[in-house]
Amino acid sequence: MSSPKRQMKLGVSMIGLGYHVAAWRQPDVPADGSPSIKHSVEVAQAAERGKLDMVFLADAVGIREYDEPPGALCRFSNSSRFEPITLLAALSMATERIGLVATLSTTYSEPFHVARQFASLDHLSCGRAGWNVVTSVTPMEAQNFNYETTPDYDKRYGRAAEFVEVVRGLWDCWEDDAFVRDKATGVFFDPAKMHVLNHKGPHFSVRGPINIPRTPQGYPVIVQAGTSDDGMDVAARFAEVIFGAPLTIKASQDYFKEVKSRAQDKFGRNPDHLKVMPGLSTYVGRTEEEANEKFEYQNSLMHPVVAREILSTVLGNVDLTPYDFDGPLPDNLPMSNASQSTFKYVTELAKKDKLSMRQIAQVVAGARAKMVIKGTPKQIADHMEQWYVEEAADGFNIMPPHLPGSLNDFVELVIPELQRRGLFRKEYEGKTLRENLGLPRPSNRFFDKKAVAAE
């Protein structure tokens, strides 16, 4: 394959101890690593050593309470994790160039808090912050915020779109040079360069301004993972990075084309300013045999009761207990109020490959229904290059099966192969996440209005 002039973008999802549900049982994984700053620093520094664009912290604002089938709940390690902004603030002091991206929900947060938190992180990190915009979908999250159940789908996405618009407005309330800090005159900020947002909409009434200067990046990078129709609209309108979950190159190509076309045609955006980065979990070996051994060993650590539970979870907490686990996935499963795209991917894959529920559970357990590949550095680079060159992806969000070992394998074995092919950087292009992703710094809406009025 011929390599294009552009280069792929790479992030790593550093959730807990790894993406495989049995990651914590690996001998070289610190079982107490989730609440350990030492573990998190080791992971972030490994990613920076590989010149990756960003580390990404997925998050949820609740933990599962249901235990179905019985005995599954106590076998999961993801009930313990840092609050992401707190952790990334600490990691900003232990890293220099890598982007720091965190999830914060629009369903149970307020725009002013989110705008201030990410602006603070962007200042602390000298321009490396990113916000992963999500809507919360689980009842246990709702019940932590004075709701009995999750708000309906349309309400969540309507609120999310307005939420992001308010946050971006708050980030604009101070012009870049508003804080003059002139000791001679005693003027700390120029009042003509401080603006009141005065947003009033269906979901929010927010005055502003935010009480922190405009950030080094103008806006922290906005990340999204929407693949439903409404989610795709939010992504096409606002997102600069999209984390996707397609399991086939055709599905990813269709999504890549659709979301970029929608960004351009519906919202007037440059499609190159939206980076599509599907999730990818890798088992890397110096030989195929070694890669297969790593894959089989990791899956051998997964308890059967966990396999059933994780399949239920990725399908939206569908009750699978009435069905034979060694039989096919039923055709009449109800689509829940959770991720419609994941439900579709998993059910179609099971049907296409004629997998039993036990077999499809083993597939999705490896990376929570994201793509899993195994092989030599050349084989994995071949796969990544094909998706990249054939416009199925601008890069990938690497989802290591276990941390830090799987990430170290990727950095030490796959990154050099990608660099040899000219597909990935050898040094960072800039100091900010935007510079490294090749994204422009957004203009300030209030400054632009003043400039137009002055003409």
Image (cartoon, rainbow, N blue to C red):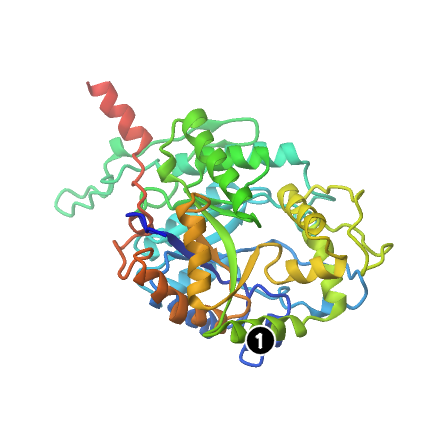
Asked which quadrant contains residue 63, the reply is bottom right
Residue 345 in the image, given as x and y percentages of width and height: 64, 46
How dense is the environment of label 1, judged by Cα within 10 Å: few (below 14), some, or many (20 and up)?
some
401 is higher (above) or lower (below) than 165 = below
**Foreground residue among 312 and 206:** 312
Q: Secondary structure at mark 1?
A: helix
- Give the percent coordinates (x, y) of residue 35: 54, 70
Residue at (65, 58) in percent of width and height: 364
Quadrant that contains the C terminus: top left
Along the line of sight, the residue nearer the viewer: 144 or 159: 159
Task: Determine the residue positioned at 39% across, 26% down.
Answer: 268
Badge 1 is on which residue?
A: 293
Residue at the spot 40% in from the left edge and 70% down from the top edge: 413
**Quadrant of the rendered image containing residue 340:** top right
Which one is in front, 371 or 177? 371
Residue lying farthest to the bottom in this orientation:
27
Residue 193 visible in the displayed image:
yes
Report how many numbered discs are placed on residues in the image: 1
